[in-house]
Amino acid sequence: MRNIPSLLLAVLLACALCAGCGAPAAPEAPPAAGQTGPVTDQTEPPADQTGPVTVLPEADHPDLTGVYTDKQGTADVYSELELALQADGTYKVTMGLYRITTLEGTAVWRDGTLHFTSKTPAVEADITVADGGAEVTVTASEQAYISVGDVYAFPDGAPDPAPRPESLPGAYRAVLTDLLEKGVFPGGEEAERFADSAPDQYAVFDVDGDGREELLIRHTDAPTAGMVEKVYDIDPGTGAVREQFSDFPGMSFYDNGALKVEMSHNQGRAGNVLWPYALWTYQAGTDSYEVVGIVDAWDKSLGETMGDDLAFPADVDQDGDGVVYYIMPYGGYWLEEEYAVDKARYDLWVDTYLGGAAALEIPFQDLTAESLEG
């Protein structure tokens, strides 16, 4: 019996030694002075980490949400940059570059600069916003027609407000309803479109200066051959809607009644000198447009011959700048010397029809069920 205390003492000692075997680890050191959150070590990724490192947006920057546009001095929006601030502090970005591509992606603040990264095609750029406009400078690109260092400006701000739906005449409302619900223009002409295409655009505006508002419809989300812009008018005698003009989208209306329509392609030798176009004038007597010519150009730096028997008309190039212009009759396309002029004569021709005229600012809006309400 005298050995029981010794045995009991041994058992108690063993229990004490095992008491910490399943105990939780000791708490981490307290946070440094002024630090309220948990202590982490995430400033640098582990040496063996191969995945992307998430860069969180910086705080304390102004909200740049908005639509920034480039109208190139016309009434139409050519390129558009849309920024939308998201809950996590990044921006959803959609950037449509005229005749190049549309980029979609995300922008995040890095070292005081809003840096944009697109999805496919992969493009990176820095975005700056000042005085109501925006500028995008490309820093990396896998897109064939976008190069590092390219700068795209969006100086014009958002498009003008759309007209109130209640100002829409009933005859025009019927035309737009048929296009929205049935996909047809007046007369049953089908509007060719891509699947899940973006909405058409329309505006009600007096583009020819006759005192009556015309209906303009712009249909662009389609194959090139199916793209069209139409102008409709209401016959004051019968109240019926009639088509006044129809051509490829890219129309610029002027306050003197002139109408400039850019061609769908620039596949000649004009290069960056100009985009080929047709010029029309409004005839009040017939309430219609009359064409005055098709314009193209030849930049000699892009080649001095075209085909086997057409050479750059050097004798026409009076100022020696290596560029001649062609003013051709409508209905054909002939880069022949009889239609070639130098820049001085071309400028005089343009001034005859557009001198002193200003492009009209036409407030287009998306054709949706909501826009037709009221």
Image (cartoon, helix red, strand yellow):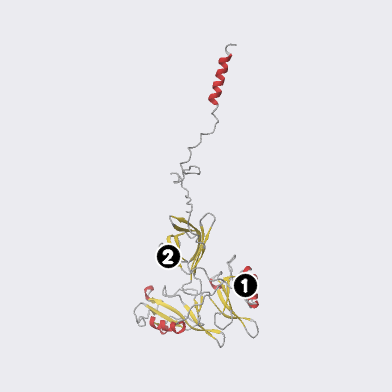
- Residue 196 against residue 216 in the figure, above or below: above
Label 1 amino acid? Answer: Pro
Q: Which tag, 2 or 1, sits closer to the chain's start?
A: 2
Contact? badges 2 and 1 (CB < 8 Å): no
What x and y, as percent, mark residue 161?
55, 71
Q: Is residue 277 left or right of residue 317?
A: right
Label 2 amino acid? Answer: Val
Say the numbered circle drawn on residue 84.
Answer: none
Say the numbered circle drawn on residue 165.
Answer: 1
Quadrant of the frame with the N terminus:
top right
What x and y, as percent, mark residue 311?
38, 79
Camera-near label (2 vs 1) is 1
Q: Give the quarter of the image for residue 87.
A: bottom right
Q: In front: 181, or 89? A: 89
- Residue 221 against residue 63 in the figure, above or below: below
Q: Give the quarter of the image for residue 126.
A: bottom left
What whole-number distance in Å separates the C-alpha atoms at marks 2 and 1? 38 Å
What x and y, as percent, mark residue 29?
48, 37
- Residue 346 against residue 139 in the figure, above or below: below
Q: Residue at x 55, y 18 (%)?
A: 10
Residue topped by disc 2: 151
What x and y, as percent, mark residue 345?
40, 83
Q: Secondary structure at mark 1?
A: helix
Quadrant of the frame with the C terminus:
bottom right
Q: Give the quarter of the image for residue 295.
A: bottom left
